[in-house]
Image (cartoon, rainbow, N blue to C red):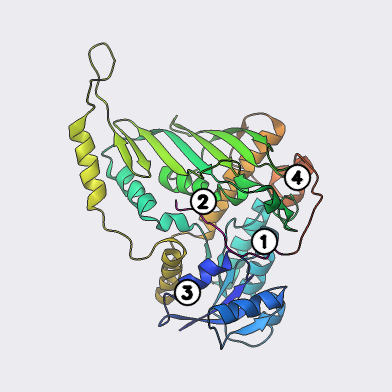
Amino acid sequence: MIQVAIVGTGNISNAHIRGLLEFPERCRIAALVDIYPEKARAAKEKYGLKDAAVFDSHEKMLSSGLKIDLVHVCTPPSCHAEIAIHSMDAGISVLVEKPMAPSLKECDEMLEAEKRNHVTMACIAQNRFRNIIYKLKKTVESGLAGKIRCAHVDSLWWRGHCYYDLWWRGTWEKEGGGPTLNHAVHHIDMINWIQGGLPEEVTSMLANVMHDNSEVEDLSFAALRYGDGSVAEVTSSVVHHGEEQGIVLQCEKAKIAAPWSCVAEVTKENGFPVEGHNQELMEELKAYYNSLPDLVYEGHAGEIDDVLAALEKGARPLITGADGRKTVELITAIYKAGFEKRTVTLPIGPEDEYYTETGLQKHAVHFYEKGKSIENFASSEITVGTY
């Protein structure tokens, strides 16, 4: 039985708790930790966790003598590294919410803590455990559509003006960035996973068009170029009504996308497309996609299942700290390109100012200064997207 502690009992912790409760024979929530202990006690009551201990700091939980095998880090991004490293130094494995950390330096310190303590670190990217993303990845790997030549990634969300009133949101220091870091992190992880690696060049434009109570961007456009000559574009937004998220892959032989769609063309002698498309290839792709079995668990429950299995079997989870770092590296490159208004190259190493949180904040554009700040919202209901 894996003993679990949840550190941070805000909005996203609900997805973690519900996911863990899917596996009562494999794990037990032994502790709930929050700097506002009343929130931890409310979660304990809401989910009937009568045996869970409540703490107001992760340090108190770690020094309590309570047996913990896995810590879920569900706090604001600025303290992910501190909590994860302290936990790993105590010999405890961790599952860290997105983004892994605001800076590459912190990511590397977390990876080093995992290595020296011989524990396991996994990073949340739960949309890999969505059927439509998993099946899209498998369809790419089948080779039926050919190599990816151009990808369009839409991480489109909508958040009201008051969203950034919460004390830690909308600041480079506490949140680490806007939707590029905190929302598109899902879709940037997906394109890294599907492409199999990072691009070589990045250029971007950052803007804040609707939230004048926030220092950070609420919209960004990024263009990526890969070593094989293929390209991608990523839109990261919290200003799009309808929240229409998705990935479109223009491959050599066909377009395939999530949500699932497929079109394949064949050419006339003059280079124009034949009417009616390439129906044979489209049917083959559709049949392959539909033949793939559904995942047993989706979203956070799917990733938690994978992490529990890794701990039980002494294996590696699907989404490791190295994966979390790759996502942060691409996001850092998008910020660097946007701040400096130029194309930048990867990798970003320790010699680069943007490798550290201090360096990134030094160059960060403050679109506005945060004026209003509240400790907590009355409502804890949130949306986490579907893909």
Q: Residue at x 22, y 52 (%)?
A: 291
Is the residue under label 3 in contact with that under label 2 (CB below 8 Å)? no
Magenta stretch secondary structure, dominant: loop
- Binning the other alpha carbons within 10 Å of mark 3 as few (below 14), some (14 to 19) or many (20 upward) gives many
Say which mark, if any, is on residue 220: none
Is there any visible trace of residue 120 in the rendered image?
Answer: no
* Mark found first going from the N terminus, 2 or 4: 2
Q: Amino acid at mark 1?
A: Pro
* Mark found first going from the N terminus, 3 or 1: 3
Asked if 294 appears above or below 170 in the picture, the reply is below
Q: Which residue is mark 3?
A: 20
Q: Which residue is mark 4?
A: 215
Question: From which residue to which does the magenta span run?
Answer: 376-387
Q: Residue at x 67, y 72 (%)?
A: 86
Q: Amino acid at mark 3?
A: Leu
* Mark found first going from the N terminus, 1 or 4: 1
